[in-house]
Amino acid sequence: MQIWDISVPISPGMPVWPGDPHVELERMVAIARGDSCNLSRLACSAHTGTHVDAPLHFIDDGAPVEQLPLDVLIGPALVVELADAEAITPAHLDALVLPEQTTRLLFKTRNSALWQQPAHAFASDFVALTSDAAAWMVQRGIQLVGIDYLSVQLFQDTDSLTHRLLLEAGVVIVEGLNLYDIEPGSYQLICLPLMLMGSDGAPARAVLMRE
Ligand SMILES: [Zn+2]
């Protein structure tokens, strides 16, 4: 069994969405200062690094993150590579000719190369899904979509339609994946968001496995 970690490292200096708080991770109690143990304090957005969006993120009475179904967060996933895409459109999705049983789809794009420098400045020209592509995914019965940068929707798409179409249909959105080392193909996905009660999202550890 091979296991690939597709999470991004969480540390101060990592890119965050413009306006979101920067990550603070600091040693509050330290053996080096005479304390009996080391103890760190973490402060960050619930949408830090590799994370999951709950329906509540864009729907005010939507489900919070603890209600996301584990049987969607864990299971077979297909990694597809769209190396030349700037925005993922229905034409890209049609051309993929997805196997019938596909319900979890992870997009590897040029975004993944950005994570080669974990502390890079936020890149607003990342690749993401158009709202037409989101509608396509819903129509096709996709239950989980993963993208390799901090949003599933293009930076300039301020109508939030991509997010809303997916979340209203109950599609689980995983953002901030690093698929740089991942060959396109079939894997088992395990993505476990922290159980932050009542939250609109949560950081997650995500791995792919293959026999
Ligand atoms: Zn998010």
Image: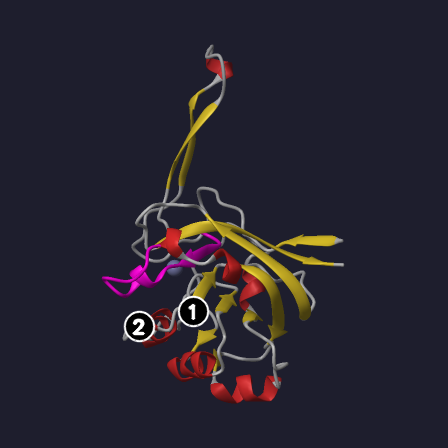
The relative height of residue 192 versus residue 158 in the rendered view (above or below) is: above
- Residue type at numbered disc 1: Val
Front one among 196 and 141: 141
Q: Is residue 53 magenta?
A: yes
Residue that lies at the very extreme toward the top in this rendered image: 34
Q: In which quarter of the view is residue 6 placed?
A: bottom right
Number of marks? 2
Q: How much space separates mark 2 and mark 1, taking CA atoms?
A: 15 Å
Q: Secondary structure at mark 2?
A: loop
Location of residue 38 with respect to 176 vertically, above or below: above
- The overriding secondary structure of the stretch rendered in magenta is loop
The residue drawn where x is 50% and y is 75% is 142
The magenta segment is 48-64
In which quadrant of the rendered image does the C terminus lie? bottom right
Q: From the viewer's perspective, is residue 92 above or below residue 142?
A: below
For the question of whether residue 47 can be seen, the reply is no
Amino acid tagged 2: Ser
The answer to which of 50 and 121 lies nearer the viewer is: 50
Q: 36 or 125: which is nearer to us?
A: 36
Residue 77 falls left or right of residue 52: right
Q: Which residue is mark 2?
A: 160
Check disc 1 and report the residue beneath it.
171
